[in-house]
Amino acid sequence: MKRLAASIALLLAACAPAARPAADAAPHVVGGDAVATGRYIALVGGCNDCHTAYYPDSNGETPEAEWLKGSPIGHYGPWGTTYPSNLRLVAASMDEDQWVETVSTARYRPPMPWYLLHQYNHADLRALYQYIRQLPGDPGVAMPTALPPAPTPPPTGPYYDYTHGGPPPPASAPPSP
Ligand code: HEC
């Protein structure tokens, strides 16, 4: 009887979920290595769509040497005009732990889908960091500073216009950093 009780205790211990933070326990990408995994995440996570200039226009054929250097094309909307940051420089300005802490908690202006970054498994965020850090070649330059809300679009430079004929913004204003 004693042996049976011990076996049950062992079995229960084996079934108990590991005490890990949800962000680490959630599903995550299993790749060949961190860099290959990070590349895959950047690709299917759609980061290039905004953070690589004219990537959608190239049908996704922009050479990898140009990936994630940011885009000088403004995103003009009720939130002002935002410019997708140069993620190579952003990643280079922090270590891996700071990156995970920052992107899993920070809120940015539209159309940055920061709320999706909050859902990423931390292992995936680490792989993404390692991929970005090893990208070869010229890291590029910082993108323009965001402009405040304005009735007219930015006076210089190309921009995407989110104000034409769309629905009004929701009553609760989008978050700003
Ligand atoms: C729909 C466009 C869009 C997509 C897709 C997108 N971003 Fe962004 N991102 C932006 C814009 C615009 C900003 C600047 C926001 C601001 O100024 O507040 C930004 C800012 C950021 C920042 C803050 C950088 C800084 O300057 O501190 C990080 C980090 C970031 N994006 C990571 C990512 C990652 C990783 C992905 C892919 C998983 C991604 N973004 C996908 C548009 C986008």
Image (spheres, rainbow, N blue to C red):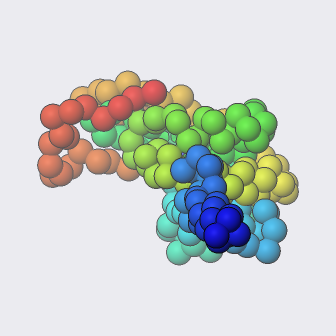
Can I make out residue 48 in this image?
no
Q: Foreground: 57 or 104?
A: 104
Asked if 145 appears above or below 40 in the picture, the reply is above
Q: Quadrant of residue 96?
A: top right
Can I make out residue 79 in this image?
yes
Q: Foreground: 157 or 58?
A: 58
Asked if 30 appears above or below 119 in the picture, the reply is below
> Whole-percent x and y of residue 54?
54, 60
Q: Foreground: 122 or 82?
A: 122
> Whole-percent x and y of residue 26?
55, 59
> Whole-percent x and y of residue 99?
68, 39
Q: In which quarter of the image is the N terminus?
A: bottom right
Residue at (21%, 33%) from the top-left corner?
A: 172
Residue at (46%, 36%) from the top-left corner?
A: 108
Residue at (57%, 50%) from the top-left corner?
A: 23
Residue at (29%, 27%) from the top-left corner?
A: 150
Asked if 146 appears above or below 6 in the picture, the reply is above
